[in-house]
Image (tube, rainbow, N blue to C red):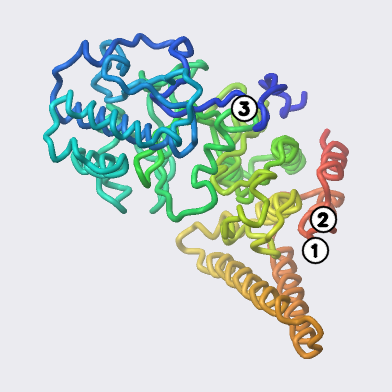
Amino acid sequence: MDSCAIKQISTAESSLQFSKQLNLTKIIGYYPQKDQLNLNLIPLTDVLPIEINLLDFIMTNLICNILEIIKRELETPNISLDQIMVIKNNHNCGIPFIFSKQDKTNAKQCEHKLLKQFSFLCEQLGYDDEFVNSTSLKHFQDRLLLRINFQYDALEQNTATLLEYLKIFQNFPIHKNQFTHIYPIEFPKFLIKEKYEEQIVVKIQKIVKEEFYELREISIIEDFNNTHLPYLYGYLRYNEILMLFLKKHDYSFNFISKKIFKIKQKLNPEKLSQFFYKLYRSMIKAVNYIHSMDIIHRDLKPDNIMFDLVQPSTVVVDFLNTPFNCVLIDFDRSITSEQIQPQNQSNYEGTQFYRPPEGVQNNYNSSYDIWQLGFMWLVMQKSFMYEREESKNTAQQNFYKNIESQQTQIQQENEKIADLKNKTFDNFALKFQRQQHLDKKKKLYQDLIQQIEKKENFINYDVSLQNLIQKMIELEPNNRANISEIFKILDKIIE
């Protein structure tokens, strides 16, 4: 049985173009029509008066959503006091619900009118004159965020504040760094339960810098409806903080590989190889799907590739015998075909260790993702990738750091090559200098791959897969293997 076929659902009309036609949105608390909701809503006026801190949070969510609606140029919402709804018996989560006025107007074009309406709303709710007379919607947002103790440039503190206000219990994080926190949570009552899920995850992310459309991940995954892709239940945005409520997946490729490595002595080598071949085929099927939607992921790595088991198990050896499905996550650095235009490019360079030798490009294509997969399959075959995390194994740690250092040198050569390319024209000396950097980059890259290939194998690959990986990680993007070639080899070696 093809593990990649497990739990497939129809995706006939889930393209980005189709979702734009429908003007769909996953902003929590904003819906074009009331009949889209399966929630027991009542007017906010039915629960007034309420404590000031709860009112402040409701108004914070309201102003943040209004600004988001304007930013995305969605239909103008009706923010009259009698049209603002809350969840019956759960209004203390602080989420107000508003709906389109159904007058075919664009919120961006009605921003001044919305400012007047919001000011009047604040007056009705008893806010003081100084607050009511705020000069812009952004000014209202800044003041309300301060009232709920929101601090700028403080992800840790803001995460705790927002989760407490939203009545979400803060579990131990699945992932945590200076820019992103991911927590498993019980399904919040303010979300529409479209699928049977007892537990989901909330991804709380700090926007580091302005890029072309800073809601890149949301704009791409908002209407995904495919088992190889993340499912977004909804999102909230608080100025620089994004909260994405996503489907929870079982295990990352990184987690599975590490667990298997620890028990490798107990496993049949051929069965181990076959297991990884099937993992890879599931990965390439998922990548093939996003490429068919004109999406380039640009940050494929072991932590961004998840697997759902048909029969979830915590027993590692069961992984080898259980059908699974690959899910690609973290699309915040991905691009669509329309974003490939030069004026829409970001300067994102990807995770350093999994950055292709060509680096930042004006025109990205599928070969970028192909290289990341091929390089990942190469290094995840090697024992050093797992041994380096052992505190006493400084040799493997140093080797890993050396790879990163060499990759940095390759990217530095890219910068010099790009700079000289803009200067050469008919200057022979500059052309010669540029060629020297091209030759140096090629040698650095060849040395890098050769060093990795010499390391001890944890998995024994079929020769045809080894040759395929070499083609997937070709220095020249146009010479890399394509999806069809990869499928052909994997189908041949999978028993």
State yes or no: discs 2 and 1 in contact (Cβ < 8 Å): yes
Residue 242 percent across, percent down from the top left: 41, 40
Element type at marker 2?
loop
- Going by the numbered disc 2, the residue's amino acid type is Arg
Residue at the spot x=17%, y=38% of the render? 131
In the image, is residue 325 above or below residue 258? above
Is 420 situated left or right of 400 in this image? right
Between the C-alphas of marks 2 and 1, the distance is 7 Å
User: Which circle marks residue 480 in the picture?
Assistant: 2
For marks 2 and 3, give the CA distance: 32 Å
Q: Is residue 258 visible?
A: no
Q: Quadrant of the C terminus?
A: top right
Q: Which residue is mark 3?
A: 19
Q: Amino acid at mark 1?
A: Glu
Q: CA distance from mark 1 to mark 3?
A: 35 Å
Q: Which residue is mark 1?
A: 476
